[in-house]
Amino acid sequence: MKYKAIIGLEVHVELKTNSKMFCSCSADYFGQEPNTHTCPVCLGLPGALPVPNKKAIEWCVKIGMALNCDTPLFSKFDRKNYFYPDLAKGYQISQYDKPFCINGHMTLSNGKKIGIRRVHMEEDTGKLIHETVDGIKVTLIDFNRSGVPLVEIVTEPDFETAEEVKEYLQKLQQIVRYLGVSNADMEKGNMRLEPNISLRKEGQDGLPNYKVEVKNINSFSFVGKAIDYEIKRHEEILESGKTPTQETRGFVEKNSSTVSQRIKEEASDYRYFPEPDIPPIRWADREISKLKSQIPELPDEKLKRFIKDYAVTEYDASILTKAIEMADYFEEAVKIGKSNNLNAKQIANFIINRKQDINNILPAKLIENILEATKTEKVSETELEKIANEVLSKNPQAILDYKNGKENAIMFLIGQVMRQIGKKIDAEQIKAVLTAKLK
Ligand SMILES: [Zn+2]
């Protein structure tokens, strides 16, 4: 390809705190009666004062820490001014030049480090609902979501392909779930994705002089499609000797394309200034250390430890560590399995190959099930002898192969004996009888 894609990503993650970011209204808005989780603060009424949610701030910092960010001891909130019908105050409380976390990174499976520029805290907006009431087209506003804590995670423009972006997103989703700070449920809009894309001629240095942002995508696969579509579109424009317009576009699901929405605002258009109603935040070192000590073992470390401690394959370890609930379940089962002479590998195989529903089977019950499934039936020595003789007489070629050193031949003969017996008996027992006869 003559061009190299330069892709950055902004992700909004909705936190699952009980209350909203700046008031005590419930943040659990999904599926609730419209405008029932509201108060003067989140309705933006004059004179209402915001009080920051401590837990939300701590969770934001934890996300930053899990992404290897620095946490400056000084931080503050700012007003981002823009006029939009779902933004009751006419501004959003966000963070501009002093975000909670900066300078992190995430390492992808190809070894590439994606820089994390910043992780900051802000509030969600209300929701517009376009409907027809009494034959008239109207727009209704539901403020239940207004003021729900949002963490924005901004990467450096370090991605080159849609695949890298998708892997980053999957890992990010896994991390916030491990931290227990968000359900990161795409369908419920807990994670919203905004890639920005530009192309650079191969061999050229520096960033291109334009950037196209695609707004509010709610699925990993759509992000991939939007990126691929944009790369192709930019290529065509550049080939014709023009430069793509710097703008914000929207993703169109039905034909996996994007359409122009508006010419992108510059930071100065938002007239950021420090939020006068919230004092700046000054962390003490011990507060930062305390938060750091609360970060659990994260997916990458857990994966490595599972491979090392439990001798499972990397593939199996990735399935077992995908969700923390599964990882905890597996480790609990391994503990119980130990006293029943079951090793971790057997347990891993059973969970993965038999697709166990870990929400309905307790680890102890799982171990019982494995013991039951691996239990072998007894068969009398004389019956086994008789069948072994029959099998050997019918398979002279296998005997010859075995005598010529083909180890596989014995497995074939064991299989034949098992089939004829029609019971599940210990393969080692059959092997012993067969090898004795073949001597
Ligand atoms: Zn409220």
Image (cartoon, rainbow, N blue to C red):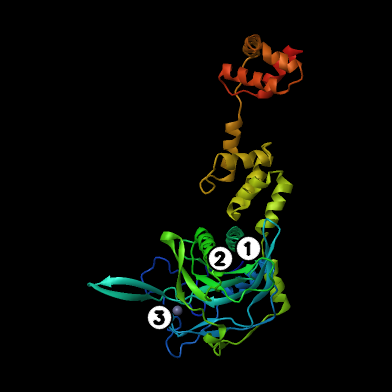
User: Which residue is drawn at the image coordinates 77% and 13% (left, top)?
Assistant: 439
> Circle 2 sits on which residue?
235
Q: Quadrant of the N terminus?
A: bottom right
Which x, y percent locates residue 392?
66, 11
Quarter of image, ligand 1:
bottom left
Q: Is residue 110 left or right of residue 222?
A: right
Report the Cα–Cα distance between label 3 and label 1: 43 Å
> Circle 3 sits on which residue?
85
Q: Could you say which is closer to the camera, residue 323 or residue 68?
A: 68
Q: Could you say which is closer to the camera, residue 173 or residue 203?
A: 203
Q: Amino acid at mark 2?
A: Glu
User: Which residue is drawn at the image coordinates 57% and 37% (left, top)?
Assistant: 369
Give the number of the mark in front: 3 or 1. 1
Which structural element holds mark 3?
loop
User: Which residue is drawn at the image coordinates 30% and 75% (left, top)?
Assistant: 138
User: Which residue is drawn at the image coordinates 73% and 23% (left, top)?
Assistant: 407
Mark 1 touching mark 2, by CB under 8 A?
Answer: yes
| Residue 185, placed above or below residue 336 | below
